[in-house]
Amino acid sequence: MNKWTKLIITVILIAPLFNGYAFAQDKEYKDVKYPRIYSLVVDRFMNGNNDNNKMIKNNEKSKDLPLGGDFQGIESKLDYIHDMGFNTIHISPVFSHEQNDFLGYKVNNYDEIDNVLGGEKAFKSLISEIHKKDMKIIVDMPTTYTDEFKQSVNGDLNKVQQSYFKNDKFIDLKDNENQGIYKAKVKSFVDQYDVDGISMNIVQDDIDAQAFLPEGLDTYGIINKDGIDAKNFKHLSTNKTRTAIQNAFKTVDTEIPDYKQDGEVLIADTWFTERFTKHAADENMFPGTRIKQMMTYMWGYKGPIMMNYGTEIAVNGSKIETINQLQNFRTDKEVINYLEKISETFKQYQELLEGDVKVLPHDKGTNVFYYDTNTVDYILNINDSSNSKKVTLTDKEIEKNKMLSGLILGDSIKNKNNQYNLITDREESELYAVINERGLNNGYFVAAILVVLLFGLFIFLVSRRSKRQRK
């Protein structure tokens, strides 16, 4: 190989380094400040230690009995939960309870951690590992009546709750003495185990969390039935909003709710309501697509969101034991992969959650949210209709000399006749960054042409040398 050939090859290899075009580097990011909560039933999630299952008396015919999930099982799957984008884990009650109770609400003793779930040592280990990953843990507090309390009440329950609790009594949280006892137990539990927050499935109307929960604690009130009110929880999940989300995304061509600004928890189903997947299946819709659309909507919310375990594998159920099935980690991972992608996208561009959010004009079955920030603005375009949709924006919504860069699907839109046409296929969503318009990169094209010319010259010289050698 002569010196000219070597020179040409060298230039071809290094030319792209001098083309003046640089690809954007991936940003380093931390978790969004808003809770992204993965909600799970300890007994139904993962069995990590068979030794604590000796007390379980189960059989194949009884799906409403414990199956052996424990704290060790959750700890072994923390990366699985974190990779889907969740920064908070919400678990079912952990206190000593009846042996045939898989949910943990039939409490015997509020001062002991249940051994069948792994016991105190395993519980502390789980919390420690969660905190090492900069995640938080929320534990659901039952209000089941025990002899320690003065007065009991009947629960205000939906049908699923009635099938589980039957005739069980609940602590009267309007009674002053009960309030003091309960608050002391919650404080002792939180302080001893370094728990980050407490949730409560509310079964008594018109209760005041300030009266029976310690100050300075993240509190989540979950209402599973219309007609129940509660106040002074830091975050509240109402059955009305849950139903609205469920109805919006179980099928197409429905009204997609605007985001509220009061910190309410967005959730589609709980341990005591029919699974979201059931409602999608009843509409003859493909659950995977329905879940992806719903979770994209949820991720765009400036507030806490909560996803029930198994949603990522489209768990379906309407009865207490099928709502809370044993998790199957070997099921198709299409939705899991999508959750990983959108969570990474929203985390990388999380400044969109720092600004104001306004709703742009849209058709039924769609919604368009504009995120106005101090740096880069964003647009979340959700097409949950049965047809392709075009949303036309003008310089009234977007500044001149801007373009839209798609962050999920990769669609790029430039100004054409002072309009931006956002086109999405049916059941498709895209998040756009509103950035300065990019023209043709002259340096890049000069370098590309130079590479082609040099490569042609290289082929010519090699061919000529080959002919000389044959002669």
Image (spheres, rainbow, N blue to C red):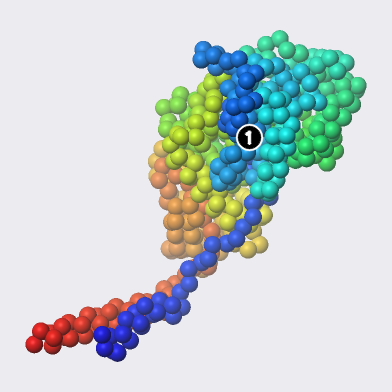
Coordinates of residue 462 in the picture (x, y in percent):
20, 82
Residue at horizontal 15 percent and vertical 83 percent from the top: 466
- Viewer-side residue, 275 vs 418: 275
Coordinates of residue 133 in the picture (x, y in percent):
66, 48
Quadrant in the picture for the C terminus: bottom left
Furthest-bottom residue in this view:
3
In this view of the protein, can residue 280 be seen by the observer? yes
- Please determine whether, in this image, residue 204 is positioned above or below residue 262: above
**Quarter location, residue 231:** top right
Furthest-top residue in this view:
167
Quadrant in the picture for the N terminus: bottom left
How many badges with numbers are in the image? 1
In this view of the protein, can residue 221 be seen by the observer? no
Residue at horizontal 68 percent and vertical 48 percent from the top: 132
Name the side, left or right, on which 443 lies relative to 215: left
Name the side, left or right, on which 181 lies relative to 10: right
Coordinates of residue 157 in the picture (x, y in percent):
68, 17
Q: Is mark 1 on a helix, strand or loop?
A: helix
- Viewer-side residue, 336 vs 261: 336
Coordinates of residue 248 in the picture (x, y in percent):
53, 34
Residue at horizontal 90 percent and vertical 23 percent from the top: 176
Furthest-front residue in this view:
51
**Quarter location, residue 242:** top right
Residue at horizontal 51 percent and vertical 66 percent from the top: 24
Q: What residue type is labelled 1?
A: Gln
* Residue linked to disc 1: 72
- Viewer-side residue, 53 vs 359: 53
**Quarter location, residue 117:** top right
Name the side, left or right, on which 160 lies relative to 96: left
- Please determine whether, in this image, residue 165 is positioned above or below residue 35: above
Task: Tell me the crowding category of disc 1: few under 14, some 14 to 19, or many 20 or more residues within 10 angstroms, Cα based.
Answer: many
